[in-house]
Image (spheres, grey):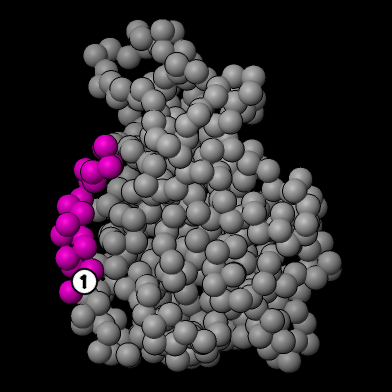
Amino acid sequence: MDPQRRVIVDGAVAIEGNKIVAVGKTEELKNVLKDPVVIDAKHKAVMPGLINLHYHAHMLIRGLIANEAPTATLDELLYQFFYPLAIKMSPEEIYAEACLAYVESIKTGTTCVNDIYWRIVQLADAAKDTGIRAVISSEALDLAPSETIEDNEKGFLARNNSADGRVKIWFGIEWLPVCSTEMVMKARELANKYKTGIHVHLDESIWEVEQCKKKFGKRPIEQAYEDGILGEDCVAAHCVWVSDKEMKILAMTKTSVSHNPVSNMWFANGFARAPDMLASGINVGLGTDNPTNNADMFEVMKMASLVHKGNRQDISLMQAPQILTMATLNGAKALGMGKELGSIEKGKIADLILINTHTTRFEPLLLGKMSNLESHLVYAAHGECVDTSIIDGKIVMDNKKMVSIDEEKVMEKAKKALNSVKEKVF
């Protein structure tokens, strides 16, 4: 994923500390490091770790929604289940589910999550203990019982740049129908004060658009622009029902968008105009969003390509190289880390994954002039193909086994937390 989009056959990556110090042919790199630890990557593709640009770590309710409220729309789900549940969950329960969410992310190839949820301290501690890189913000709102933007500020002061700099804290905004203008503007004020970013849901559903028009007389992105929250330091999640005017606003303000096709289909919210946004120069990354399914970004990559081909009846749209860019470089750029993450280049931070290509999913594998590697990574691979994950120069998963934390204990604690939580709402 470097500027030349090179595929180096029989290649090697040299890592010193948390940085990549050399990339090239294995023979050329043999003497770069003194007494190195060597990972034999035969039959494996080494690629940048995937960046999940919009994520909620509330994994405990996975599957329960489909069972208990199979026809609930997004707004009904939030008011009937999520908001009442989240406010009742203990810090220990939040930590348990965040550990589960982050472990699943690591095991399926994600090395960095942009997580918007509640209890920043517990989320940050879970990121520290699991070894993942995380940008964390509160799902703040002030027109229903919830965490507030002031809670987000406390979390920033307590945990920003923790875990040796792996954890960054941004300011989060739920969505405009449940937020006062004063709160939204306060989020921008605090983001500017602390020189950090903003994570917000915009134009996710028709319900949201109609509520904003009723409340403000404007569509969500138009109102967000008036409130001053858009910009290069802002990630706008979803953006499904974007008008032409709103698209121009996103491009003009250089706001990044997280495209979350699996979630948008799950809630029957439609298909975002991702191809149009990319064509207009908007930086678009990819995210899994909600826990209705899984944290597998390979699934998201495949869907991000196929849904637009099918919806537009245009097979030329969203080709594999563009999808891989969205899941790596575009995500890094959106988080203000384009110079540090997203590609395997000298001087960048070593966030890498190794993909096992010695499987029926990848064979026959061709490299060189007729390489089918990129196509296989987008259309054939899934998270279980990930063999090894390296984050910040440290091996956090080796041969599918978590090194940074005890996976069995994580699952056990999450199960206990669910048994405690399910009585609170369901």
Going 55% across and 31% down the picture, which residue do you hit? Answer: 373
- In the displayed structure, does residue 397 sit left or right of residue 111? left
Q: Is residue 85 above or below residue 63?
A: below
Mark 1 is surrounded, within 10 Å at the Cα level, by few (under 14), some (14 to 19) or many (20 or more) other residues, namely some
Q: Is residue 289 above or below residue 31?
A: below
Going 39% across and 42% down the picture, which residue do you hit? Answer: 385
Going 66% across and 85% down the picture, which residue do you hit? Answer: 207
Quarter holding the N terminus is: top right
The residue singled out by tag 1 in the image is: 415
* Residue 398 among those drawn in magenta: yes
Residue kind at label 1, given as amino acid type:
Lys
* Residue 181 among those drawn in magenta: no
* Residue 322 placement: quadrant: top right
Residue toward you, 8 or 404: 8
Going 76% across and 74% down the picture, which residue do you hit? Answer: 222
Residue 202, position as x, y percentages in the image: 64, 72
Q: Is residue 38 above or below residue 211?
A: above
Residue toward you, 102 or 380: 380
Q: What secondary structure is marked by label 1? A: helix
* Residue 85 placement: quadrant: bottom left
Residue 376, position as x, y percentages in the image: 54, 38
Q: Which residues are magenta?
A: 397-416
Residue 189, position as x, y percentages in the image: 58, 69
Residue toward you, 313 or 244: 313
- In the displayed structure, does residue 141 sit left or right of residue 12? right
